[in-house]
Image (tube, rainbow, N blue to C red):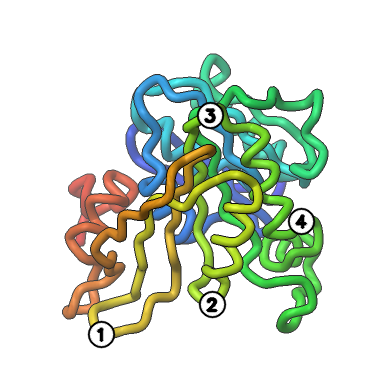
Amino acid sequence: MDGTRHEYLGGGITAVVSEAHSFGTDAVLLAHFASPGKWAVCCDLGSGCGIIPLLWCRHEGGRITAVELQPLGVKQIEAAIELNSLSDRLTAVNADLRDLKGRVPFGCFDLVTMNPPYKASGAGIESSSAPDKIARHETMCSLSEVCAAAAKLLNFGGRFCVCIRPERLCELFCEMRSAGVEPKRLRLVAKCPGKAPWLVLVEGRRGGKSGMTVMPDLFVHGEDGGYSAEMKEIYGDYLPENRGEGN
């Protein structure tokens, strides 16, 4: 596929990435935070290049559906499925999360994830690139629509895991509760100790009771400027140094 390259994730899994559909630290953190059970049935919304499902595929587990609106992203996921021989575990669906009826089964998933657009429609300068605009701004879906889609897909007691900028956390809680998903677990992510959080990881449960667990803060870097010990563990064999290939 023109304009794409292979990126090894560790665990025998390789992603197919492009300039339009790549991934960042936030997706890696969300994949780890969500950590599906061994036989969990999972769905990743707005999957991009399929990074979150592919990171899960580094470990044994259940079936995963990757929903992506943009055709190039779907092609990249399909290429990764073929490259990694994952057709028995991972399925790509080209669909709009606002209109999933008949495309993805409702009420069947143990876990739904999404790394949503961080900026509300009209907030900030929008990218001139269509893929970047869709990924970063709510041009194709709102936070309300994301939560509603997740609620429809989840079974009762199923988990919805999402990452968001701190300034939109209250909005996320309101939309989750409005959709019948109760916020249950939260973790703040900062670049390093002493810095304000730049990301929040949130888990909700469909039909869950009130009461939230707040985890210790996660630091991407240590005081020496390198990755923290926890971050190295999260990245795993994705980091060359963890594969014994250098510092």
N-term-proximal mark, 2 vs 3? 3
Query: Residue lying furthest top in this view?
Result: 88
> How would you rate the neighbour count of disc 3 (Cα within 10 Å): few for under 14, some for 14-19, many for 20 or more?
some
Q: Residues within 10 Å of mark 4 (few under 14, many from 20)?
A: some
For the residue labelled by badge 1, is the local secondary structure a helix, a strand or a loop? loop
* Mark 2 in CB contact with mark 3 (< 8 angstroms): no
Q: What is the quadrant of residue 150 in the picture? A: top right
Residue 96: percent from left, percent from top: 79, 42
Assign a secondary structure to mark 3: strand
Disc 4 residue type (three-letter): Cys
Q: Position of residue 192 (x, y in %)?
A: 27, 77
Nearer mark to the viewer, of 4 and 3: 3
Q: Give the residue type that dot 2 points to.
A: Glu
Q: Which mark is residue 167?
A: 2
How many residues crowd around disc 1 within 10 Å: few (fewer than 14), some, or many (20 or more)? few
Residue at the spot of label 4: 141
- Earlier in the chain: of badge 1 and badge 2, it is 2
Between label 3 and label 1, give the one nearer the viewer: 3
Q: Who is closer to the viewer here, 197 or 230?
A: 197
95 to the left or right of 232:
right
Q: Quote the CA–CA distance across marks 4 and 3.
A: 24 Å
Q: CA distance from mark 2 to mark 3?
A: 29 Å
Q: Residue at x 21, y 57 (%)?
A: 230
Q: Secondary structure at mark 2?
A: helix
Using the image, determine if residue 193 lies above or below residue 216. below
Report the residue marked by disc 1: 194
